[in-house]
Image (tube, rainbow, N blue to C red):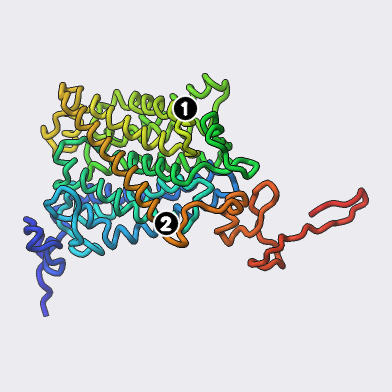
Amino acid sequence: MAEPEIVPVTEWPEWFTNPDGGDPLTQDLNAPYDKGDLAWLLVCTILCWQITPAIGFLYAGMHRRKAALTMVLQSLFCACACGIQYWIYGYSLYQSRTTNPILGDLSLAVFKNVLAQPSLANSDIPDILYAAFGFTFVSATAMILAGAMLERGRLFPSMVFLLCWTTFVYYFLAYWEWNPSGWLYNLGLYDFAGSGPVHIASGFGALAWSMMLGPRLNEHGVAPTVSDRKSKLAHYKPHSPLLMCIGTVFIWFGWFAFNGASTANLSLRSIYVVVNTNLAACGGGMTWVILEYLYKKKFSLTGFCSGIIAGLVGITPAAGFVPVYVACLVGAITSVCSFYVVKYKYILSVDDGLDIFAIHGIGGVVGDILTGFFAANFVPALDGVSGASYEGGWWNSNFRQMGLQLAGATTCAAWSFFVSCLLLFIINKIPGLHIRATEEQEVRGLDVNYLEDLDFEDGLGHGCMISEGVSRHSNTPPQQEIVKTEGGEKND
């Protein structure tokens, strides 16, 4: 029996006629696509994935030791659970071929009808590849937000909240900005790689979560009074600066792919975006550490890491729009704004110990505004597809753009904050889902309470590994063995 001839696809059928794009048994569905574009997006997708556990390492290093491993667990949860959610219905909610301006439908649920048809983001890549790339965005966003539970949030309710938050905040905002039917998309907002759905949303969601949880207990296990919180907030140094720096390095590394692949093809614009991303991180890191040195007369690894992240946040909406000679300035300005929000955050009396609101929330808003200032019409045209479809910002005397940027940033901030407060209020009222840990759990540490890897703790709140001969479920701490020596006694 003769094998059927494989015919290259020369023209895609209408999506509603054939959502898959053709019959792979008789047609070569790869033919219309450039292999370089496919390779670029696929490699960037793989590199982007590690941003989520890298955020876990960053947060774990910045925590006190007694709650550090809980952040690593959260990063694995976000990578797994948010990935399953994205596959079941998330991708469909923001990338379905609907015409309403608010939210998609379930026509792409479980990736049904997601294969070779050109994606909505760019006709140069297929649906299935863009779906794979989009997964890394939602898991990283959820992990950025997860840091707000800082040492006092209960684990299971936090997981419930993160899945509800991605449903009712992230996917709504993603549809508004990235779907051609979304109202912010049609308004003309410039947000290259997701400042609104990723940074502003997670930053203002973290503010809401921190407010609803209340402040951490102080070193004596006592809740600070309102007057105490107005004068100063509890500040604890990172238990592992090395782990914090490793997390930052991998986030920086992954952000090249996060921004670079948002062109949805391999082009001069992709290269331009990578250069912009690097320069903004450099500018942000140097600016923050210099400012901190001016105040404290010492350098700070925490400051360096915070500045680098702030620079990456600021350039996220701007990377594909601004000229390369202002990228460092974008990172520096974002870093300055975030630095002073951190410095005076005690005025809000909110215990956001990881500065998620300052760096991601305010940093994202600043990035949106700077995009309105510096966007130049020639930068998007470097992708070989956009042409003259972008008017630029104030750089090209398009003064209207600043109003659009402010409208977009305000919308994302307000939606995330109020929906987050509502979700947390509802979850907290459900029996068994109280969002705040008990005083005893907080004092002992979340790691001891939730992780089997750590069953006991010493008097300083440091986790102790399980000793041989002691049951994992024993309530009695392992006893130290006293060994007699010639000079006296020694504890082993």
Number of other residues with Cα within 10 Å of mark 1, as a class: few under 14, some 14 to 19, many 20 or more: few
**Residue found at x 11% / y 35%:** 389
Q: How many numbered marks, from 0 up?
A: 2
**Secondary element at tag 1:** loop
Please, is residue 90 above or below residue 180 in the view?
A: below
Residue 406, given in percent of the width and then of the height, sits at 24, 31
**Residue found at x 19% / y 40%:** 184
Residue 170, given in percent of the width and then of the height, sits at 30, 48
Residue 69, given in percent of the width and then of the height, sits at 54, 52
What's under tag 2, amino acid-wise?
Lys
Spatial separation of the CA atoms under disc 2 and disc 1 = 32 Å
Residues at circles 2 and 1 in contact by the CB criterion of under 8 Å = no
From the image, tell me which residue sits under label 2: 429
| Quarter occupied by the C terminus | bottom right
Number of other residues with Cα within 10 Å of mark 2, as a class: few under 14, some 14 to 19, many 20 or more: few
Asked whether residue 115 is in view, the answer is yes
Q: What is the residue that sits farthest to the right in this orientation?
A: 486
| Quarter occupied by the N terminus | bottom left
Q: What is the residue that sits farthest to the top in this orientation?
A: 294
Frontmost residue, 353 versus 303: 353
From the image, tell me which residue sits under label 1: 344
Frontmost residue, 221 versus 182: 221
Left or right side of 197 for 398: left
Where residue 371 sits, quadrant-wise, is: top left
What's under tag 1, amino acid-wise?
Tyr
Frontmost residue, 449 versus 382: 449
Left or right side of 392 for 426: right
Of marks 2 and 1, the one in the foreground: 2
